[in-house]
Amino acid sequence: MAVRSEAVTPTWRDGRVTSWLTTLDHKRIGILYIVTSLAFFLLGGILALLIRTQLITPDTDIFARDTLDFLSREIATVGALSSLEGVNPMLRFHMGAAMNVGLTENQAKELVALIGSEVGKKAGDNAGEVLQQVLDSRAK
């Protein structure tokens, strides 16, 4: 009497990489944890060496930030903070900082109107209230 066996077709989880990534075996998970932590440790070390390389001599621009001027950075920060809730003190500071580096009152009002139309009415109203507080404090 002959025994018949059918060929087993491997599933997608039987591959070399996917079997490691989709495992439930605690030993494999531990190995993955150790390998991942070592990889990020090495990446952090490499980035630290790059920063130290930049600091060896003055005017070494490995990580240059000349893309945006101060006013553009403050406008971007105001736009990002306006979309968040509970950050009004930071928003107030950055609106004041934007006005210190050259943002006019009319431009600030246009920015608030743009925030209201693009981000949302609630964010625009909040930014308008914060702008009014900044303008009131500057008038004193």
Image: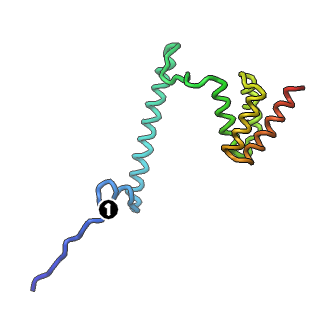
Q: Is residue 131 above or below residue 100?
A: below
Q: Position of residue 97 (x, y in %)?
A: 73, 27
Closer to us: 135 or 111: 111
Badge 1 marks a residue whose secondary structure is helix
Extreme residue toward the bottom, this view: 1
Residue 113 vs residue 3: left or right?
A: right
Query: Which residue in the rendered view is the most extreme toward the left?
Result: 1
Location of residue 59 in the rendering, given as x and y in whole percent from the top left corner:
52, 14
Residue 49: name its quadrant: top left
Quarter of the image where the C terminus is located = top right
Comparing 1 with 118, the one in front is: 118
Instruction: Return the residue found at the far top.
Output: 58
Name the colouring of the figure. rainbow
Tell me the residue that label 1 is attached to. Answer: 12
Residue pictured at 50% horizontal, 13% vertical: 57
Residue at 42% in and 36% down: 42
